[in-house]
Image (cartoon, coloured by chain):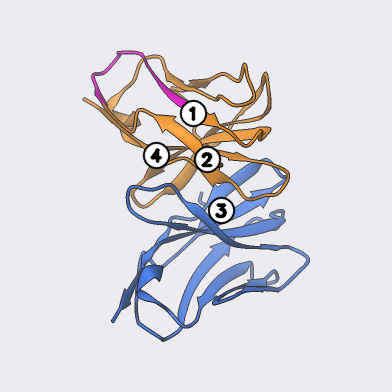
Amino acid sequence: DQQVKQNSPSLSVQEGRISILNCDYTNSMFDYFLWYKKYPAEGPTFLISISSIKDKNEDGRFTVFLNKSAKHLSLHIVPSQPGDSAVYFCALIQGAQKLVFGQGTRLTINP
Amino acid sequence: EAQVTQNPRYLITVTGKKLTVTCSQNMNHEYMSWYRQDPGLGLRQIYYSMNVEVTDKGDVPEGYKVSRKEKRNFPLILESPSPNQTSLYFCASRGDSYEQYFGPGTRLTVT
Protein backbone atom coordinates (compact mmCIF):
# COMPACT_ATOMS: atom_id res chain seq x y z
CA ASP A 1 0.00 0.00 0.00
CA GLN A 2 1.69 3.16 -1.22
CA GLN A 3 1.63 5.97 1.30
CA VAL A 4 2.67 8.61 -1.22
CA LYS A 5 1.27 8.92 -4.74
CA GLN A 6 2.12 11.08 -7.68
CA ASN A 7 -0.74 10.21 -9.98
CA SER A 8 0.65 11.88 -13.10
CA PRO A 9 3.59 9.93 -14.55
CA SER A 10 4.22 12.74 -17.02
CA LEU A 11 3.35 16.36 -17.66
CA SER A 12 4.01 18.56 -20.67
CA VAL A 13 3.98 22.36 -20.34
CA GLN A 14 4.77 25.19 -22.69
CA GLU A 15 7.75 27.37 -21.87
CA GLY A 16 6.73 30.42 -19.85
CA ARG A 17 3.55 28.85 -18.51
CA ILE A 18 2.95 27.45 -15.03
CA SER A 19 3.84 23.84 -14.19
CA ILE A 20 1.88 22.23 -11.37
CA LEU A 21 3.02 18.92 -9.95
CA ASN A 22 0.90 17.08 -7.41
CA CYS A 23 1.46 14.61 -4.62
CA ASP A 24 -1.08 12.90 -2.36
CA TYR A 25 -0.39 11.03 0.85
CA THR A 26 -2.34 8.88 3.25
CA ASN A 27 -0.40 9.05 6.53
CA SER A 28 -1.16 12.15 8.60
CA MET A 29 2.00 11.52 10.68
CA PHE A 30 4.27 12.94 7.99
CA ASP A 31 5.75 16.14 9.35
CA TYR A 32 8.10 17.46 6.68
CA PHE A 33 7.71 17.53 2.92
CA LEU A 34 10.30 17.97 0.18
CA TRP A 35 10.54 18.11 -3.58
CA TYR A 36 13.51 16.67 -5.45
CA LYS A 37 14.46 17.09 -9.07
CA LYS A 38 16.29 14.42 -11.04
CA TYR A 39 18.08 14.62 -14.34
CA PRO A 40 19.07 11.45 -16.24
CA ALA A 41 22.29 9.80 -15.04
CA GLU A 42 22.37 11.97 -11.91
CA GLY A 43 21.17 11.60 -8.35
CA PRO A 44 18.13 13.55 -7.12
CA THR A 45 18.83 17.10 -6.00
CA PHE A 46 16.87 18.97 -3.36
CA LEU A 47 14.58 21.67 -4.67
CA ILE A 48 12.29 23.05 -1.96
CA SER A 49 10.66 21.94 1.28
CA ILE A 50 7.88 22.78 3.71
CA SER A 51 7.13 21.81 7.28
CA SER A 52 3.73 20.64 8.43
CA ILE A 53 3.13 23.86 10.35
CA LYS A 54 3.09 25.91 7.16
CA ASP A 55 0.88 25.87 4.09
CA LYS A 56 3.14 27.65 1.61
CA ASN A 57 6.84 28.13 0.95
CA GLU A 58 8.26 30.12 -1.92
CA ASP A 59 11.75 30.18 -3.41
CA GLY A 60 12.13 32.15 -6.60
CA ARG A 61 10.15 30.47 -9.37
CA PHE A 62 9.24 27.54 -7.13
CA THR A 63 6.39 27.45 -4.62
CA VAL A 64 5.27 24.48 -2.59
CA PHE A 65 1.74 24.32 -1.18
CA LEU A 66 0.60 21.99 1.58
CA ASN A 67 -3.06 21.18 2.26
CA LYS A 68 -2.99 19.01 5.37
CA SER A 69 -6.71 18.42 5.54
CA ALA A 70 -6.68 17.07 2.00
CA LYS A 71 -3.28 15.38 2.49
CA HIS A 72 -2.12 17.05 -0.69
CA LEU A 73 1.17 18.66 -1.67
CA SER A 74 1.86 20.58 -4.85
CA LEU A 75 4.80 22.26 -6.54
CA HIS A 76 4.27 25.27 -8.77
CA ILE A 77 6.94 26.41 -11.19
CA VAL A 78 6.37 29.75 -12.86
CA PRO A 79 7.48 30.66 -15.41
CA SER A 80 8.55 27.23 -16.64
CA GLN A 81 11.90 27.04 -18.43
CA PRO A 82 13.44 24.35 -20.66
CA GLY A 83 15.99 23.54 -17.94
CA ASP A 84 13.11 22.52 -15.68
CA SER A 85 12.56 19.40 -17.80
CA ALA A 86 13.33 16.56 -15.38
CA VAL A 87 11.68 13.99 -13.15
CA TYR A 88 10.25 15.46 -9.95
CA PHE A 89 9.77 13.43 -6.78
CA CYS A 90 7.87 14.45 -3.70
CA ALA A 91 9.37 13.03 -0.51
CA LEU A 92 7.78 12.94 2.91
CA ILE A 93 9.46 12.50 6.27
CA GLN A 94 8.07 10.84 9.33
CA GLY A 95 9.91 11.06 12.62
CA ALA A 96 13.12 12.50 11.11
CA GLN A 97 14.31 9.09 9.97
CA LYS A 98 12.29 7.62 7.16
CA LEU A 99 11.98 9.36 3.85
CA VAL A 100 9.15 8.08 1.65
CA PHE A 101 9.18 9.03 -2.02
CA GLY A 102 6.44 9.31 -4.58
CA GLN A 103 6.72 7.55 -7.92
CA GLY A 104 7.89 10.65 -9.77
CA THR A 105 6.45 12.88 -12.50
CA ARG A 106 8.39 13.49 -15.70
CA LEU A 107 8.04 17.17 -16.61
CA THR A 108 8.75 18.26 -20.17
CA ILE A 109 8.91 21.96 -21.00
CA ASN A 110 8.21 22.62 -24.68
CA PRO A 111 9.65 25.70 -26.43
CA GLU B 1 33.48 20.17 -2.98
CA ALA B 2 30.74 18.70 -0.79
CA GLN B 3 29.62 15.44 -2.33
CA VAL B 4 28.46 11.87 -2.00
CA THR B 5 30.39 9.39 -4.13
CA GLN B 6 29.42 5.87 -5.13
CA ASN B 7 31.42 3.11 -6.78
CA PRO B 8 31.04 1.48 -9.14
CA ARG B 9 28.66 3.52 -11.28
CA TYR B 10 27.76 0.52 -13.42
CA LEU B 11 27.96 -3.16 -12.57
CA ILE B 12 26.87 -6.31 -14.37
CA THR B 13 27.14 -9.50 -12.36
CA VAL B 14 25.73 -12.99 -12.11
CA THR B 15 23.31 -14.50 -9.64
CA GLY B 16 24.92 -15.45 -6.34
CA LYS B 17 28.20 -13.59 -6.72
CA LYS B 18 28.70 -11.36 -3.68
CA LEU B 19 29.19 -7.68 -4.38
CA THR B 20 29.67 -4.43 -2.50
CA VAL B 21 28.72 -0.93 -3.60
CA THR B 22 30.70 1.70 -1.75
CA CYS B 23 29.37 5.06 -0.61
CA SER B 24 31.35 7.90 0.89
CA GLN B 25 30.47 11.45 1.94
CA ASN B 26 32.77 14.32 2.85
CA MET B 27 30.26 16.51 4.71
CA ASN B 28 30.64 14.93 8.15
CA HIS B 29 26.98 13.92 8.04
CA GLU B 30 25.70 11.54 10.68
CA TYR B 31 22.73 10.23 8.70
CA MET B 32 23.26 8.06 5.63
CA SER B 33 20.84 5.96 3.62
CA TRP B 34 20.50 3.66 0.63
CA TYR B 35 17.64 3.68 -1.89
CA ARG B 36 16.73 1.75 -4.98
CA GLN B 37 14.83 3.27 -7.87
CA ASP B 38 12.57 1.13 -10.03
CA PRO B 39 10.17 2.20 -12.81
CA GLY B 40 6.77 3.19 -11.48
CA LEU B 41 7.87 2.78 -7.86
CA GLY B 42 10.01 5.85 -7.24
CA LEU B 43 12.81 5.56 -4.71
CA ARG B 44 12.44 3.07 -1.89
CA GLN B 45 14.59 3.08 1.19
CA ILE B 46 16.70 -0.04 1.78
CA TYR B 47 18.63 0.77 4.95
CA TYR B 48 19.59 3.86 6.87
CA SER B 49 22.10 4.78 9.55
CA MET B 50 21.68 7.49 12.15
CA ASN B 51 25.35 7.32 13.18
CA VAL B 52 28.41 5.08 13.38
CA GLU B 53 27.48 1.51 14.34
CA VAL B 54 23.75 2.37 14.21
CA THR B 55 21.81 0.97 11.27
CA ASP B 56 18.15 0.19 10.69
CA LYS B 57 15.94 -1.34 8.03
CA GLY B 58 14.05 0.74 5.54
CA ASP B 59 11.12 -0.45 3.46
CA VAL B 60 12.90 -3.04 1.29
CA PRO B 61 15.86 -4.49 3.24
CA GLU B 62 15.56 -8.12 2.13
CA GLY B 63 18.69 -9.39 0.39
CA TYR B 64 20.86 -6.47 1.49
CA LYS B 65 23.31 -5.75 4.29
CA VAL B 66 25.02 -2.56 5.35
CA SER B 67 27.72 -1.52 7.78
CA ARG B 68 28.69 1.81 9.30
CA LYS B 69 32.13 1.50 10.85
CA GLU B 70 33.13 5.07 10.06
CA LYS B 71 31.07 8.20 9.72
CA ARG B 72 31.99 8.87 6.10
CA ASN B 73 31.40 5.39 4.62
CA PHE B 74 28.23 3.34 4.26
CA PRO B 75 28.71 0.33 1.95
CA LEU B 76 25.81 -1.70 0.59
CA ILE B 77 26.44 -5.44 0.46
CA LEU B 78 24.57 -8.00 -1.62
CA GLU B 79 25.65 -11.41 -0.29
CA SER B 80 23.88 -13.42 -2.98
CA PRO B 81 22.46 -11.13 -5.66
CA SER B 82 19.37 -12.18 -7.57
CA PRO B 83 17.84 -10.80 -10.80
CA ASN B 84 15.12 -8.97 -8.84
CA GLN B 85 17.87 -6.80 -7.37
CA THR B 86 18.58 -5.35 -10.79
CA SER B 87 17.96 -1.68 -10.17
CA LEU B 88 19.39 1.82 -9.88
CA TYR B 89 20.84 2.41 -6.42
CA PHE B 90 21.39 5.73 -4.68
CA CYS B 91 23.29 6.54 -1.53
CA ALA B 92 22.41 9.70 0.39
CA SER B 93 23.47 11.62 3.47
CA ARG B 94 22.14 14.52 5.47
CA GLY B 95 23.23 16.75 8.30
CA ASP B 96 21.03 18.66 10.72
CA SER B 97 18.44 19.65 8.14
CA TYR B 98 16.02 17.27 6.44
CA GLU B 99 17.56 17.75 3.00
CA GLN B 100 19.38 14.66 1.78
CA TYR B 101 22.30 14.84 -0.61
CA PHE B 102 22.37 12.02 -3.13
CA GLY B 103 25.21 10.29 -4.90
CA PRO B 104 25.20 9.86 -8.70
CA GLY B 105 23.75 6.36 -8.62
CA THR B 106 24.93 2.81 -9.33
CA ARG B 107 23.18 0.87 -12.06
CA LEU B 108 23.28 -2.82 -11.16
CA THR B 109 22.30 -5.65 -13.48
CA VAL B 110 22.12 -9.20 -12.12
CA THR B 111 21.84 -11.93 -14.76
Q: Chain of mark 1?
A: B
**Number of the label disc, if any, that sits on residue B3:** 2
**Number of the label disc, if any, that sits on residue B105:** 4
Image x and y of residue B56, in percent: 63, 27
Name the residue nearer the viewer: A15 or B60. A15
Image x and y of residue A90, in percent: 53, 59
Distance (Cα) linking label 2 and label 1: 11 Å
Segment tinted magenta in the rendering: B12-23
Residue drawn at the location 23% of the way across and 19% of the way down: B14
Q: Colour of chain B?
A: orange
Image x and y of residue A45, in percent: 50, 53
Distance (Cα) linking label 4 and label 1: 10 Å
Circle 4 Cα neighbour tier, 10 Å, few/some/many (<14 / 14–19 / ≥20): many
Q: State left or right for residue B96 relative to residue A77.
A: right
First in sequence: mark 4 or mark 1?
A: 1
Name the residue nearer the viewer: B42 or B69. B69
Whether marks 2 and 1 lie on the same chain: yes
Give above or below for A31 relative to B75: below
Whether marks 3 and 4 lie on the same chain: no
**Number of the label disc, if any, that sits on residue B23:** 1
First in sequence: mark 4 or mark 2?
A: 2
Front label number (3 vs 4) = 4
Label 4: state its secondary structure.
loop
Q: Chain of mark 3?
A: A
**Number of the label disc, if any, that sits on residue B52:** none
Residue drawn at the location 64% of the way across and 67% of the way down: A71
